[in-house]
Image (cartoon, helix red, strand yellow):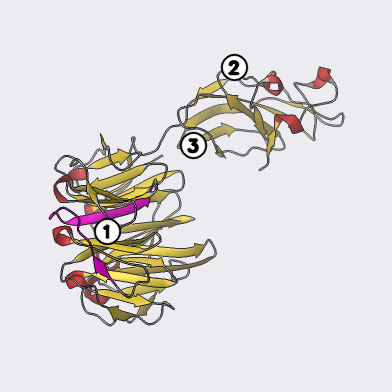
Amino acid sequence: MRLVFVGALLCVALATLSACGGSNGEEAPPPTNVAVTPGDGRVTVTFTGQSGVDYWIFYAPGTGLTADNWVTVPGAAVRRNAQSPQVIGGLVNGQAYSLAMNGRRNGGPGGPGTGTFVVTPRLAGANWVAGTSLSNVELRGGVLLGTATVVGTGGAIFNTSDGRVFNQASSGVTADLNNIAVSGTVGSATYFAVGANGTILSSSNTTLWTTRTSGTSRDLNSIALGAGRWVAVGDNGTIVTSSDGNTFAAATSGTSANLLRVVYSGRFVAVGTGGTIVSSTDGLSWQSTSSNTTEDLRALSIGSGRFVALGSNGANLISADGLSWTAQQTVGTVNFRSVTRGNQFVAVGTGGAIYTSTDGTSWTAQNSGTTVTLNSVSLLGDGYLAVGDSGVNLTSR
């Protein structure tokens, strides 16, 4: 669908400003059952239309736009050939927008407009909706590329495009899967899942999986790609790496602590039990750094120009470079399991805890609607997907 700004749509004759149509077509009635739902930097417009009608959605900052005056409203734009549901993105959170619709047939003038709908986009992460439990599996990790993929105990793998309908894939293994990562683009991607007893699986489509030899029998807890290398970390300081995704070899971490999460942003950073933090620029040579905490660190993400590490008893650390870490005020007493960054940080943990933060330092508790432990939070298109024990899955948009 094309987003056409007002300046490109001014009609020559002022008398036709509200219609902007040709002479061969005709007006059409407006759609019915129009609803506008706010999202994170976007709104979703749903409606019931008639076959053969070209519907236009007009929108602008503020509250005064109508289907008749939109061309005179500063900042107004139009989405032509709209289909339900129609997502309009690139909006500013916290800014009120007004929207209206009309229709035409065969390039004719616009017909009567709907009423004006006023809606304000807002950050996702505050309102959570529970989906149907995915049996009794413990879900432990998730990743997004076009669709979201989550992994869990017993070799479980599920795919979902909307966080509501999940399709199970066959991993070919029964080992518990702890984490999943992806690189590439939609249609040309490589996924890696890691888990118990050194399990490593790879896939190009999340439905057919190939077992890779990791060279270790230790549990692997997390995997990340950077500097042209896949790096998986696990129990007892285990680190295995691969430059081709086929053959993995051990690297020396310099620690015997369990490493629970690894990310890459200019350098690899891995966190683990007892406040352990190790880092590497190439995934091969690792160095330890002081975390200023002895709490277990399980959650790690990057955003707002910093690394954010969270752990047991509300441990909360930030770093600009992954080497020098500053302890922040603890976040309650929650034992964090996972954190991700979209338009803000979202962290999850034991007891159904969910916290959000725009900067990684100050956190706000949100109501998840569950007391089940949440093990992973990942992006989901215009929001977030949180999963946990007993197959619990929650979405926020």
For residue 94, above or below residue 227: above
Q: Residues within 10 Å of mark 2 (few under 14, many from 20)?
A: some
Q: Residue shown at 73%/23% (left/top)?
A: 111
Three-letter code for the amino acid on which mark 2 is drawn = Gly
Query: Can residue 299 be found in the magenta stretch?
Result: yes
Label whose residue precedes the other's in the sequence (3 or 2): 3
In percent of width and height, residue 163 lies at 40, 48
In percent of width and height, residue 344 lies at 38, 41
Three-letter code for the amino acid on which mark 1 is drawn = Arg
Locate residue 181 relative to residue 312 in the image: left or right: right
Three-letter code for the amino acid on which mark 3 is drawn = Gly
Image quadrant containing the C terminus:
top left
Q: CA distance from mark 3 to mark 2?
A: 20 Å
| Residue, disc 1 | 140
Label whose residue precedes the other's in the sequence (3 or 1): 3
Region rendered in magenta: 286-303
Q: Residue shown at 52%/28% (left/top)?
A: 35
Q: Residues within 10 Å of mark 3 (few under 14, many from 20)?
A: many
For residue 162, above or below residue 123: below
Q: Residue shown at 65%/23% (left/top)?
A: 74
Image quadrant containing the N terminus:
top right
For the question of whether residue 278 can be seen, the reply is yes
Kindly indicate whether the residue at mark 1 contacts the one at mark 3 (C-beta within 8 angstroms). no
Helix or strand or loop: what does disc 3 sit on? loop
Q: Which mark is residue 266?
A: none
Label whose residue precedes the other's in the sequence (2 or 1): 2
| Residue, disc 2 | 64
| Residue, disc 3 | 41
For residue 117, above or below residue 259: above
